[in-house]
Amino acid sequence: MFDLYGMIIKALRALLGPMTVWPLTTITVILLCLLIEALSILVGHKAVDRAKLARYQQEVAKWDAEYLRALKRADKKAIDKLMRRKPYIEKLRYEIMRENFKVFAIMFVPVIALWSIFKDVVGTSKVAFFPLLNIWLDFNTWYIIAIFSMSFIFQRFLKPAQRGKRRKT
């Protein structure tokens, strides 16, 4: 029987060579997470209309601020006026959520596929050593730590630059 998945695993093991054995598995998983995060950012740039998203977010934030001001002043007339725009603002909130969800929807299957493939390529036990707790981490645990770490790093260091560019335009 033709085993495509098995052939892919064997080919990747041969291609990666020593990167599939500890201690290099630690680096392999980090590189995999870097790849996933880079793909996610690329998909985000291609799939999400950043200018439209920024306009919607700005309009919603302005409405929220006006609404809070009206509530604090107990200005019934202003609250009534703002409430007439609420359905439109809720529509904008939905569009913001939809735009932000696009990347997740597009990346979900590739992330699960890469996780599944690399789990079998590097094995599931003793992928990384965590010296603070003096324990070995299996693939799943190290993958989760690495993917969240890479996501945090990319968001922390790349997103502020993107936000700054959007504000200037």
Image (spheres, rainbow, N blue to C red):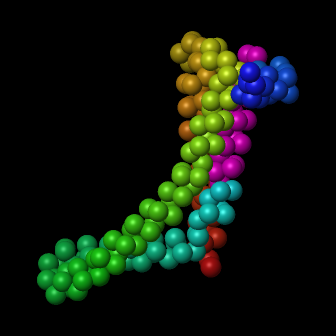
Report the number of discs: 0
Name the residue located 57 percent from the left edge and 25 percent from the top edge.
140
Across and down, in percent, residue 166 comes to: 60, 72
Quarter of the image containing the N terminus? Answer: top right
Q: In the rendered image of this protein, does residue 114 appear above or below residue 73?
A: above
Q: Quadrant of residue 127?
A: top right
Give the camera-side residue of 141 and 13.
13
Left or right of 25 in this view: 165: left
In the rendered image, residue 35 lying in the magenta stretch gets the answer: yes
Name the residue located 17 percent from the left edge and 78 percent from the top edge.
73
Across and down, in percent, residue 115 comes to: 63, 32
Left or right of 83 in this view: 143: right
Give the camera-side residue of 1 and 24.
1
Question: Can residue 146 be seen by looking at this rendering?
Answer: yes
| Secondary structure mainly formed by the magenta segment | helix
Q: In the rendered image of this protein, does residue 30 appear above or below residue 129?
A: below
Question: Can residue 131 be seen by looking at this rendering?
Answer: no
Across and down, in percent, residue 119 comes to: 65, 25
Across and down, in percent, residue 59 comes to: 42, 77
Name the residue located 65 percent from the left edge and 46 percent from the top edge.
37
Q: Which residues are magenta?
A: 21-41
Quarter of the image containing the C terminus? Answer: bottom right
